[in-house]
Amino acid sequence: MKTLVVAAHPALETSRINRKWLEEIRKYPEQITVSSLYEKYPDSVIDIAAEQALVEAHDRIILQFPFYWFNCPPLMKQWLDEVLLEGWAYGEGSWLFENKKTIGLAVSVGVKKQDYSPSGEYLHDMNTLLLPFEMTARYLKSGYEEPFIHYGVNSRTSEEELRESAERYAGHLLKATEVNV
């Protein structure tokens, strides 16, 4: 199964975890293709045909982004809106994803996991807050994978912790995963 990682980080050069994740997974070009949106499209003009060709060539699509303002970065949302078009990804006579592709997430979160719980500061767990992405996958009739989430990354996170997270992420992408269809 060939994996496409669509990554969106508006300040990748200052990112600690997302940059480390991309460095690690780029070591596996035979299994993982990276489309880093802010690197490819600094003017926010997405080459829709090129991105659709990437999606068509892969069985598994992973959306990688930092979680802030309880959502994905704007260019990721733009990618979803402009690339996953009716008549191509879904709709009358065209269900590109149906029983053929899976969608997953790789999300970095700055605060601790307990902050994202019913008793935590944000009152909801990450699966609840990421529900729009799961619903997008279900609407497209694709499988949806359990998200890969790294909590608590900040300026005090050690290089060793970053390296371990990147290795776990690469392992997650390289192994066949159980998909909720």
Image: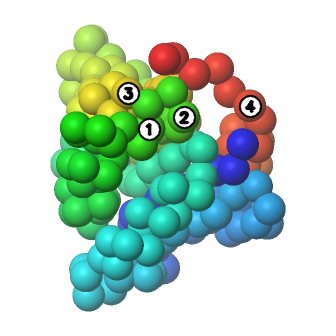
x and y, in percent, of residue 18 in the image: 53, 60
Which of 53/28 is in front? Answer: 53
Contact? badges 3 and 1 (CB < 8 Å): yes
Q: Is residue 74 visible?
A: yes
Q: Position of residue 140 (x, y in %)?
A: 33, 34
- Please tell me the numbered disc located at residue 131: none
Pair 1/4: label in front: 1
**Camera-side mark, 2 or 4:** 2
Q: Which residue is mark 1?
A: 97
Q: Determine the CA span between mark 3 and mark 4.
A: 19 Å
- Taking the image as drawn, is residue 115 in sight? no
Say what secondary structure mark 4 lies in: loop
In the image, residue 25 sits, relative to residue 11, either above or below, namely above
Q: Residue at x 26, y 87 (%)?
A: 43
- Residue at 69% in and 57% down: 32
Question: In the rendered structure, are the residues bearing label 1 and label 2 in contact, judged by CB atoms less than 8 Å apart?
Answer: yes
Mark 3 is on which residue type?
A: Lys
C-alpha gap between disc 2 and disc 3: 9 Å
Question: What mark, if any, has residue 141 been given in the picture?
Answer: 3
Which residue corresponds to mark 4? 176
Does residue 84 lie above or below 30 as drawn?
above
Q: Is residue 164 left or right of residue 81?
A: right
Residue position for label 2 = 100
Badge 3: residue crowd in 10 Å (few <14, some 14–19, many ≥20): many
- Displayed quadrant of residue 171: top right
